[in-house]
Amino acid sequence: MKSRDFCKGCRRLSGRYAMICCIMLFISLPIFPFVLVGHIVVAEWRVKNEPHVNKFAPVVLAEFTDQVFSATRESDTRDTGNMSYLTVMFSGGLGNRMFQYASLTCIAHHNKMQGHLPQGCILPEVFNIPNSELALSESIFSRPGINYPKFLEKSSYIWDKRTLRLNPKLNIELLGYFQSWKYFHSCKHKVRRQLSFKTDVVKAANMYLTQAANKAGEARPTFVSIHVRRGDITQVPHIAELGYTTATRQYFLNSMEYFKSRHKNIVFVVCSNDIKWSRENLSNNNNSIYFVDSGRDEVDLCILSRCNHSIISTGSYGWWGAWLASGEVTYYKHFPKPGSPLHKSFNPWDYFLPEWIGLD
Ligand SMILES: *[C@@H]1O[C@H](CO)[C@@H](O)[C@H](O)[C@H]1NC(C)=O
Ligand SMILES: *[C@@H]1O[C@H](CO)[C@@H](O)[C@H](O)[C@H]1NC(C)=O
Ligand SMILES: *[C@@H]1O[C@H](CO)[C@@H](O)[C@H](O)[C@H]1NC(C)=O
Ligand SMILES: *[C@@H]1O[C@H](CO)[C@@H](O)[C@H](O)[C@H]1NC(C)=O
């Protein structure tokens, strides 16, 4: 902004009042786009929520995120002494929130900021997240009248490297799904520790695994989980049109064969949001497959995380079951649907771990 030229022009035009007016206008100019664009981005992001595709005009993003990277505006950092806060706006289901939490933790660490979970987040009810990461008694990001700078990720399934250089002098709120292992690869041990399940969840999960082993008559089973993600993907046409797919019956059979060829004493443990379809399509007239019907998302996820190996279909929930289990993993190759809007904002190398195996 050429400030001198602008004010010289003003002075020539009129007297003292115009000059004051001009100065005030000049002072407030840099704030306007910041506040306005901030509101637009947050409002749009809140509305869109599901499905997980960013639809914002690149122009808005560029203008907006400049604030986050430049050191021109310093927000209130007194609460953490010399460290500023980083938070994330949670959205979606458990799997989405885990991506957001894991990324928040590691991005904050990388930028020497203090990670801050918003109040009302369900994760502390499921996991032993340390107190230091929990919402403070007074949520700094919900003070009325203060607009904190936002960082909006470019795309839901592509690692956005700009998170490596946030301005550590600002309190910043992250907006997006952050669905890439690359966001938290450098702190994976810390993330794993913090995403340890609460005792009652572990107890419930172990009960199902014991039942599965008993039914199969295996004293030393190798548990292979199968997560069958269906539900909304098969029911809501709009979601399928975006490019969400469900894995086929043949994919699950191929994956089961893959593990049978590599391990002995296998007990397959199936979790799904469509357990009926799973029973009807995956039963093998044989006791080595067990269908979990716990009715609790966190218990199912804990079961997936405690299995030795994982067969996943699509969606972030199964992804997390496999990541936490950290055994061998097969995933469904045809997600997202080729040529779909989702496919265009998807990088398989950022989403799937390099050692995971894609099958048909
Ligand atoms: C904040 O202060 C502590 C101790 O005074 C120091 O170790 C740390 O590096 C400082 N952090 C930043 C981001 O300046
Ligand atoms: C899966 O089971 C349902 C219900 O029995 C059946 O209609 C469908 O054809 C099966 N799908 C496959 C791929 O076999
Ligand atoms: C039952 O399934 C297991 C593992 O999938 C397999 O090894 C075994 O041969 C099957 N038994 C029968 C009778 O089909
Ligand atoms: C398989 O998982 C079970 C339950 O988590 C565990 O007790 C067992 O040691 C694992 N087996 C192998 C071979 O890793």
Image (tube, rainbow, N blue to C red):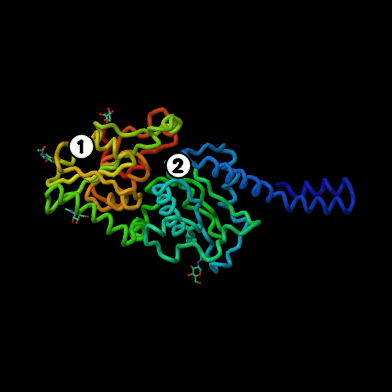
Neighbour tally class for label 1: few under 14, some 14-19, many 20 plus, Cα within 10 Å: few
Is 321 situated above or below 279? below
- Discs 2/1, front: 1
The numbered mark at residue 7 is none
Q: Amino acid at mark 2?
A: Ser
* Residue that lies at the very extreme toward the top in this rendered image: 339
The amino acid marked with disc number 1 is Ser
Horizontal side, residue 27 vs residue 295: left or right: right
How far apart marks 2 and 1 lie (CA) works out to: 35 Å
Q: Is residue 249 above or below residue 158?
A: above
User: Residue tagged by mark 1?
Assistant: 283
Judge the density around disc 2: few (<14), some (14-19), many (≥20) Cα neighbours within 10 Å.
many
Residue 175 spot, x, y in % from top left: 51, 48
- Image coordinates of residue 105 in percent, x first then y, are 43, 57
Decide if residue 322 is in sight here. Answer: no
Identify the mark at residue 156; answer none if there is no mark: 2
